[in-house]
Amino acid sequence: MNKIAVIDYGMGNLHSVAKAVEHVGRELGEPVEVVVTPDADIIASADRVIFPGVGAIRDCMAEILRLNVNEIVEDAMKSKPVLAICVGMQALMKRSEENGGVDCLGFLEGEVRYFGDNLTGENGERLKVPHMGWNQVKQTRPHPLWKDVPDNSRFYFVHSYYVQTENQEMVTGVTHYGADIVATLAADNIFATQFHPEKSQQAGLTLLRNFLQWDGSVE
Amino acid sequence: MGLAKRIIPCLDCENGRVVKGVKFLDIRDAGDPVEISKRYCDAGADEITFLDITASHEGRETTVHTVEAIASQVFIPLTVGGGIRTLEDIRTMLNAGADKVAINTAAVTNPDFVREAAQRFGSQCIVVAVDAKQVSGEGEPLKWEIFTHGGRNATGIDALEWIKRMVEYGAGEILLTSMDRDGTKTGFDLALNRAVSRAVQVPIIASGGVGNLQHLVDGIIEGEADAVLAASIFHFQEFTIGEAKQFMAQQGIEVRL
């Protein structure tokens, strides 16, 4: 039994991700157990861990710290494949500009920045914020989670803040909105996405399927 | 390469069935919402919007089950609207699998509800649905007002001012319906859309009046909308979502094919 724990720290809709993973498990014909929980012991017993997140970073971080989710994530990162999604990915960074500046977990190198109020494209056209909808993701590094996902596939994004990192080695995918921005990051057994794979139809489901089969190595 | 403009089919549902009213009055049955959602998703819909027009309490239970059934089969964003009045209503719909909720009348009766909702659940899941009607006469500067209860009740609130305020309160997206055009198949109110799209930073979904594929193109290019919503042209299979996207792509609009 492939046991997937979705860390529940009270922030937003975890149903979508749980339902998508169950769906992918059924398609694989493999028994998959998905648990949505804040319980450290249950998460420690899982084979793979999903760290989601929506909403404002300050509230997310407050709940992460209150429920010791920081320790749970740190523990999972030592031993098993971890998929961080959207604000879950942002929370792994050092710091976010959102809510006047919030310290994040600092597990990955980088900061989270605001798109700005007057974002424009190459031709001077105004770009709305949040960056909401389907954008193409260019795969900048090979990774087991990209298996069978065509390069430049569209994924569903909804965010006003984005990750910036000096460590380009970690960047596995970029999308373009005003400039090239980080769409996915990978470091050892962690894969992180700014987009929502659980809402990205075929491309997203393929990525989730790869996650269910990933052993956490990059070769 | 960039962000695609979205096509959003809208399912107006009553007691678990998809219906579509003409100017919210004359109602035709168009089928099972779960089956239709799945068909739209497979055809390339970018999101699904589910608007519950059921009035009764028992009917609300049906709606929650329908949302659950859609969410377990459709892996694109799902917005649920109609009768969202409390934080508890939002939680119920998010737990059932909705990704966003559309708040309409409750925002007008209690604007702070939008602020509370955005603070609690995040702007990304709060869509404010606005029903606007032109109130300026011929020769006067264009002016639109907010209407509630399916376009029956005037509020006296200026639409542009209202939408700016809703965005300030945390609305992450605006679903903008022209009550003059809804159900008429004469195209979106492009002047209204353009005015709203220029007034705020968040994405605008144009709604009300689509009768053919050129109307979708006009909504994006002339109305400056970020997404276009349509119901009857898809429900009664006059056009498929795929045809709509092909047509938009031919007109130079970036879409997800």
Image (spheres, coloured by chain):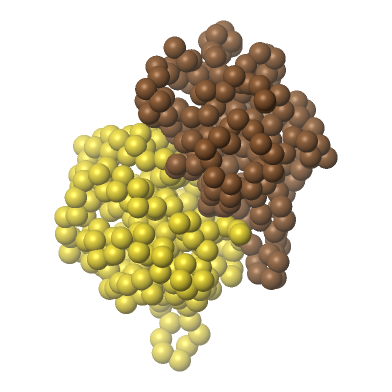
Q: Is residue A15 visible?
A: no
Name above or below for residue B139 compared with residue B178: below
| Quadrant where the N terminus of chain B is found in the figure | bottom right
Q: Provide residue A103's location: percent of width, then percent of height.
A: 77, 32
Q: Residue at x 27, y 68 (%)?
A: B183
Name above or below for residue B82 compared with residue A83: below
Q: Residue at x 52, y 38 (%)?
A: A148
Q: Provide residue B42's location: percent of width, then percent of height.
A: 35, 48
Residue B2 or residue B99, whichever sits in front: B2
Chain in brown? A
Label tally? 0
B131 on left or right of B125 = left
B118 on left or right of A64 = left
Name above or below for residue B210 compared with residue A89: below
Q: Colour of chain B?
A: yellow
Q: Provide residue B140's location: percent of width, then percent of height.
A: 47, 88
Q: Is residue B66 visible?
A: yes
| Quadrant where the C terminus of chain B is found in the figure | bottom left
Q: Residue furthest right?
A: A166
Q: Provide residue A200's location: percent of width, then percent of height.
A: 48, 43
